[in-house]
């Protein structure tokens, strides 16, 4: 097969913001090597699914999607279908060996040569893909220090308003339920000067908002200057005053007074911190290997609220972790009532093969997990609605992100506390503008306002 046929690539992205950022890297690599990115699977010669492995349901969706993609393979027998990202790293042998739809896999540290993967698979003389993959894995292992970051690759950004900037990759925490250290490797931080240069360039191009990304940004440590995350945050806030900054995600054991005070000191660092509590029970936190107590966590929340009174707090919560008792569950709900999160990502526990928690006795019945999760969701909706009711009458600086999905006669945007606001459309305004909006109404998930 002529390799020139395989030019159009369609990429679907699943999972976290890091995957969205990685898709921009992959797209850039492909374009630099003669490929085109298309927005329809039906017009593609290559379909890549950028995947997540955090939860079992995320992987189930990919297998369902592969079944759906068979219609395109029937029309184009030379169609290449690839799985990239965390699922590719975790399940390479199963994906390539057992699923006849998958031609290639590439983990998060293998994107520099993804164009070569595609070209070699396109050639008739290529031996089995399994041999090709093993050879590439050995090369990446030998060149690990060079290939694990993408400093020299400019991401393909199409938004023009908001941008993701990866500051580090990997994780050293090994929470017992999490596959990330196994799929993304150990922590590696980018040099501070490289990040500052990228942010400065984004400001010159007119970007209005930047989110700094890492599995645990609190662990950031510049390999050249030993600067920590608060140092980096101050540096970008100073060099790009026209940009407002967000970051995710933070590990509770590492969030320092220095970081909290840095956020409070700079107006263009958003008053929003996502801090994954996971559980309000010390025994469950210990089994999760979270390395902090609920008392420590509540102390950090108290510090945040004292330094940044208007700070919005969001979190992650897992219901039904192995060994969780009703008392543990109630401890989580009690912590929620004390902290009053603005929003939360809430899940029932699902075991992940290869993690330490997989070895634990998954002794909470599925029905009970669902019941506990529903209780947590109901409580959070009540808290969110109460928190949003406090916003009525307040004036927020809102970044316009686009038209409302429900009505062309409305804009939607976000406050610096990361709350969605819906307000009337005006032609004199456009995407990327900052405007002042007075809040006039609310639901548990959305604020409504009028332009001041």
Image (cartoon, rainbow, N blue to C red):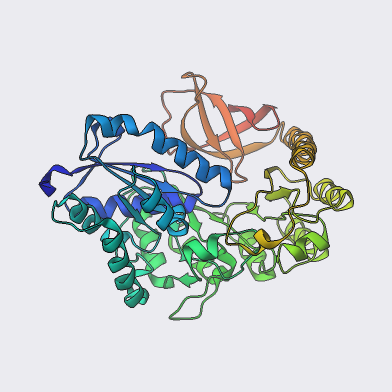
Q: Residue 298 vs residue 218: left or right?
A: right
* Residue 153 sits in quarter: bottom left
Nearest to the observer: residue 233 or residue 100: 100
Q: Residue 125 vs residue 225: left or right?
A: left
Relative height, residue 147 to residue 28 (above, below): below
Q: Who's the residue at 35% across and 50% down the image? A: 24
Q: Is residue 81 visible?
A: yes
Q: Who's the residue at 49% across and 58% down the image? A: 212
Counting from the top left corner in percent of width and height, residue 400 is at 48, 35
Relative height, residue 37 to residue 266 (above, below): above
Nearest to the observer: residue 127 or residue 420: 127
Relative height, residue 108 to residue 99 (above, below): below
Q: Residue 315 vs residue 245: left or right?
A: right
Q: Is residue 313 visible?
A: no
Q: Who's the residue at 32% across and 75% down the image? A: 143
Q: Residue furthest right?
A: 327
Relative height, residue 339 to residue 298 (above, below): above
* Residue 125 sits in quarter: bottom left
Counting from the top left corner in percent of width and height, residue 18 is at 47, 54
Counting from the top left corner in percent of width and height, residue 438 is at 63, 31
Counting from the top left corner in percent of width and height, residue 170 is at 50, 66
The image quadrant where one finds the C terminus is top right
């Amino acid at each position: 097969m002529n390799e020139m046929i395989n030019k159009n690539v369609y990429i679907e992205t699943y999972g976290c913001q890091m995957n969205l950022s990685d898709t921009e890297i992959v797209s850039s690599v492909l374009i630099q090597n003669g490929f085109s990115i298309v927005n329809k699977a039906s017009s593609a010669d290559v379909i890549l699914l950028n995947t997540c492995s955090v939860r079992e349901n995320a992987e189930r969706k990919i297998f369902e999607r592969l079944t759906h993609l068979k219609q395109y393979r029937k029309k184009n027998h030379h169609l290449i279908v690839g799985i990239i990202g965390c699922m590719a790293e975790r399940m390479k042998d199963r994906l390539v060996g057992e699923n006849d739809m998958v031609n290639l896999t590439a983990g998060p540290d293998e994107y520099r040569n993804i164009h070569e993967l595609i070209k070699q698979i396109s050639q008739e003389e290529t031996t089995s893909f399994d041999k090709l993959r093993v050879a590439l894995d050995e090369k990446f292992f030998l060149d690990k220090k060079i290939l694990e970051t993408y400093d020299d690759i400019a991401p393909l950004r199409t938004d023009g308003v908001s941008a993701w900037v990866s500051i580090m990759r990997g994780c050293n925490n090994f929470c017992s339920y999490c596959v990330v250290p196994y799929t993304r490797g150990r922590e590696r931080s980018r040099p501070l000067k490289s990040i500052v240069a990228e942010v400065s360039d984004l400001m010159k191009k007119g970007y209005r908002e930047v989110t700094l990304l890492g599995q645990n940004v609190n662990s950031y440590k510049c390999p050249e200057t030993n600067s920590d995350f608060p140092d980096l945050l101050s540096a970008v806030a100073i060099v790009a005053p026209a940009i407002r900054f967000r970051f995710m995600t933070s590990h509770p054991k590492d969030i320092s007074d220095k970081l909290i005070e840095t956020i409070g000191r700079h107006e263009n660092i958003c008053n929003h911190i996502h801090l994954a509590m996971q559980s309000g029970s010390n025994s469950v936190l210990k089994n999760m290997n979270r390395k902090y107590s609920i008392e420590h966590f509540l102390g950090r929340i108290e510090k945040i609220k004292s330094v940044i009174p208007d700070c919005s707090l969001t979190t992650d919560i897992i219901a039904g972790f192995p060994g969780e008792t009703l008392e543990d569950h109630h401890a989580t709900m009690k912590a929620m009532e004390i902290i009053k999160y603005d929003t939360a990502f809430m899940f029932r526990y699902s075991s992940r093969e290869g993690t330490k928690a997989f070895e634990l006795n998954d002794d909470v019945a599925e029905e009970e997990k669902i019941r506990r999760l529903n209780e947590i969701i109901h409580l959070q909706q009540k808290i969110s609605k109460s928190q949003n009711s406090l916003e009525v009458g307040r004036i927020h600086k809102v970044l316009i992100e686009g038209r409302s999905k429900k009505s062309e006669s409305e804009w939607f945007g976000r406050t610096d506390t990361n709350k969605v606001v819906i307000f009337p459309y005006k032609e004199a305004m456009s995407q990327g503008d900052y405007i002042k909006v007075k809040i006039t109404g609310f639901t548990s998930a959305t604020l409504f306002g009028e332009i001041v």
